Every structure is written in structure tokens, then in C-alpha cells.
Amino acid sequence: MAQPRILILGAPGAGKGTQSAKIIEEFDVDHITTGDALRNNKEMDISDMDTEYDTPGEYMDQGELVPDEVVNAIVDEALSQADGFVLDGYPRNLEQAEELEDMTDLDVVLYLDVGEEELVHRLTGRRLDPETGDIYHVEYNPPADPDVEARLVQRDDDTEDTVRERLSVFHENTEPVVEHYEEQGDLERIDGEQAPDDVWEAVKETIEDAA
Ligand code: AP5
């Protein structure tokens, strides 16, 4: 395999961002993440697209999906510039999965499997370093450096109410996508409740086996 084309699926908090950071380093691929792309464009004016709200941020802060038209354009543009990639945060519904099939082929589809209460615990305890983008957790993965600890921030949508809404959106919209890839025989299910290094071992081995 030249540079692999990897799709990583999982509920909010399953560890997609954590594992994607390792994948890009190991396999020298681009990280295409709709969540980060939208967070960098939260105030973008989308009112001419006949959407319910005028900016992506209004959807995100309520835990709802941003309209497909906005997200499809972001992914299409990013994929056109990447040879190998790990795609994280897309597709989130069956319509997006259909769009993706027209945009690119995939070498491997990973699914990080984590139970509901663990997801809530991970998301409400997640903290981000605004300078480096590194992901931490107050309990599972606190930073060693007190200067880093002092500047950590919480994501706007990591409050418990919004996390519950994001999980219900996942069950309704994204689980059918997981089932779709499973029915096609393409899904590589990985136990995402293991320690991060053990999840990484399984992820790395699965990608290498797909080569
Ligand atoms: P997005 O940014 O994609 O968020 P998400 O899918 O909800 O996923 P997260 O980034 O929250 O979690 P993650 O799986 O990356 O977990 P992480 O590695 O950080 O989307 C945000 C919003 O954007 C959406 O709600 C929507 O509004 C919009 N959006 C995005 N894409 C869209 C699309 N395609 N269509 C429409 N709208 C879209 O880990 C979580 C925590 O757990 C961290 O603290 C980490 O340290 C810890 N952790 C990780 N792994 C482990 C482990 N193995 N053991 C213990 N702790 C761990």
C-alpha cells in the first residue's frame, strides 16, 4: 500500500482524535477532521445555504449536526489535496456515506467501540492545549508540565448536557453508518475501552494487515 486511506469511526469520545494523532505520525498521512475544520470556522456565514442557523457554531454548541452541504464541501476539498489520509468525523449519516463513496476509495475502516458511560466520563474530563492542540484528560491523561496544565481549556460542547445530545445524535444518525460498513464486510471493530497504548497496538496492526 502506498499511503493508506483510512476511515476512523466511533462515538463522540471514543478516541478518534487520540488515535488519529498516532496514525498520522506512523503512516505519514493527512488528518482530515471535520470537527476541527468546523471549529476553525464556527462563525462562517452559511445563511445563503437555506439552513436553520446562520453559522456552524450554533449547531455545534447544541450538539447537533452541521448541514451536509457545508461538511461535504469541506471533505471534498481536503480529499482532493491528500494522497493518504485518516478521515475523522465523517461520514456521520448515510447521506454523507453515499457522498464519500463518490469522492474516494478506502483501504481500511476502523470502528472504536466504547460504552456509553465511559464516553460521558471521557468527554466531560477532556481538556485541550490551545497552543499545540494536544488532547488530555483530567484523570486518564493529565499533562506532566504544570505550565501546560495551567493553560488547558475545555471544549464548548463537552458539558454533560451537550455530550448527552451528541450521543443521541450518534445513535440516531451515525450508528446506521457503522452498520452499513459492517454489512459490506468492511468494518474493523476495535475494543476502544483498552488503555490508549493498547488501542494503538490494535489500530496499527489492523492498518498494517490491510496493506
Ligand atoms: P467532532 O469534533 O468530530 O467530535 P466527536 O465526534 O464528537 O468526537 P470527539 O472529538 O469529541 O471525540 P474523539 O473520538 O476524537 O475522542 P478523543 O480522542 O478526543 O465533532 C464536533 C461537532 O462538529 C459535532 O457535534 C457536529 O456539530 C460537528 N460535526 C463534525 N463533523 C460533522 C459531520 N460530518 N457532519 C455534521 N456535523 C459535523 O478522546 C476523548 C477523551 O478521552 C480525551 O480526553 C482522551 O484523552 C481520552 N481518551 C482517549 N482514548 C482513551 C482511552 N483509550 N482510555 C482512556 N481515555 C481515553
Image (cartoon, rainbow, N blue to C red):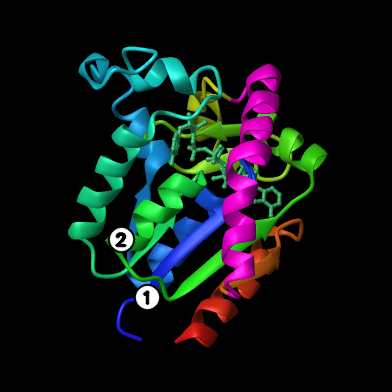
Q: Which quarter of the picture shows residue 157?
A: top right
Residue 50 image position (x, y, % from top left): 29, 17
Comparing marks 1 and 2, which lies closer to the viewer?
Answer: 2
Disc 2: residue Cβ within 8 A of ligand 1's nearest atom: no
Q: Residues within 10 Å of mark 1 (few under 14, many from 20)?
A: many
| Label placed on residue 102 | 2
Q: Residues within 10 Å of mark 2 (few under 14, many from 20)?
A: few
**Which residue lies at the image location 61% right of the left edge and 56% below the top edge?**
178
The residue labelled by disc 1 is 4
Under mark 1, the amino acid is Pro
**Which residue lies at the image location 51% right of the left edge and 44% below the top edge?**
93
Residue 114 image position (x, y, % from top left): 74, 51
Q: Nearer the viewer, residue 84 or 142?
A: 84
**Which residue lies at the image location 38% right of the left edge and 38% below the top edge?**
36
Q: Which of disc 2 and disc 1 is earlier in sequence? A: 1
Q: Please provide the residue range marked out in magenta.
A: 158-185
Q: Can the viewer see residue 29 in this picture? A: yes
Residue 26 image position (x, y, % from top left): 42, 72
Image quadrant of ligand 1?
top right
Which element type, helix, strand or loop, lies under badge 1? loop
Q: Nearer the viewer, residue 78 or 24?
A: 78
- Name above or below for residue 48 compared with residue 171: above
Q: Nearer the viewer, residue 53 or 57?
A: 53
Which element type, helix, strand or loop, lies under badge 2? helix
Residue 73 image position (x, y, % from top left): 25, 41
Q: Can the viewer see residue 10 in this picture? A: no
Q: Magenta stretch: residue 37 in it?
A: no
Q: Magenta stretch: residue 168 in it?
A: yes
Under mark 2, the amino acid is Asp
Magenta region's main secondary structure? helix
Disc 1: residue Cβ within 8 A of ligand 1's nearest atom: no
- Name above or below for residue 121 compared with residue 155: below
